[in-house]
Image (spheres, grey):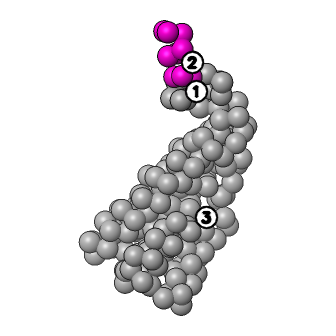
Amino acid sequence: MPAVLYHLQETRKFTDKRILRALATAGLFGNVVRTNASISGAEVGCQGEVGVACAMAAAAASQLFGGTLAQIEYAAEMGLEHHLGLTCDPVCGLVQIPCIERNAFAASRALDANTYANFTDGRHRVSFDRVVATMHQTGKDLPSLYKETSTGGLASNSDMDEQPGDPALRTKDLNKEH
């Protein structure tokens, strides 16, 4: 949310007042999810955190760009729909991997959902409410090891001392060759 709104304010020069209205729009969508499902990674996986934030940012962006109510709802629906089933599997229980990257990609996805929705008339087949209900059920169906426990997914397959992309590891490998 903050990255999307900051980017739009800096590049499109939206006023503080318009940003505040967009935040209110985003908050409405977030509250719908909080009331009818969850925004907790521990309860429904990262779809409830990153997915909902993406939906909120998409709705805010659509509102800023003059989307109709149908287009705003469609942008939010796409933002959440395309995160359904996302696990919460932080490496070592920290938010650095993969959380930071997921949030960055979700910010980009929110802007894309806004663009797509605002190029349509807003009509679509799956409502935001239906996606929220689906996310809630999907979260119930996810095994607990994929819900912020650091026992499944990426979290269970990591050894922070031996990461293949780690520059320190590459240095160790180079030193072995010499």
Tell me which residue sits at (49%, 54%) in the image: 104
Rendering coords of residue 54 (x, y %): 50, 61
- Residue 97 as seen in the image, left or right of residue 121: right
Magenta span? 168-178
Q: Earlier in the sequence, mark 3 or mark 2?
A: 3
Work out whether residue 129 can be spotted.
no
Work out whether residue 121 can be spotted.
yes
Kindly identify the amino acid type of the residue bearing the numbered disc 3: Val
Q: Residue at label 1?
A: 168
Q: Which mark is residue 172?
A: 2
Q: Closer to the camera, 158 or 117?
A: 158
Rendering coords of residue 5 (x, y %): 50, 73
Tell me which residue sits at (37%, 84%) in the image: 66
Establish if 110 lies above or below 158: below
Compute the Cα span from label 3 to label 2: 47 Å
Q: Residue at label 3?
A: 33
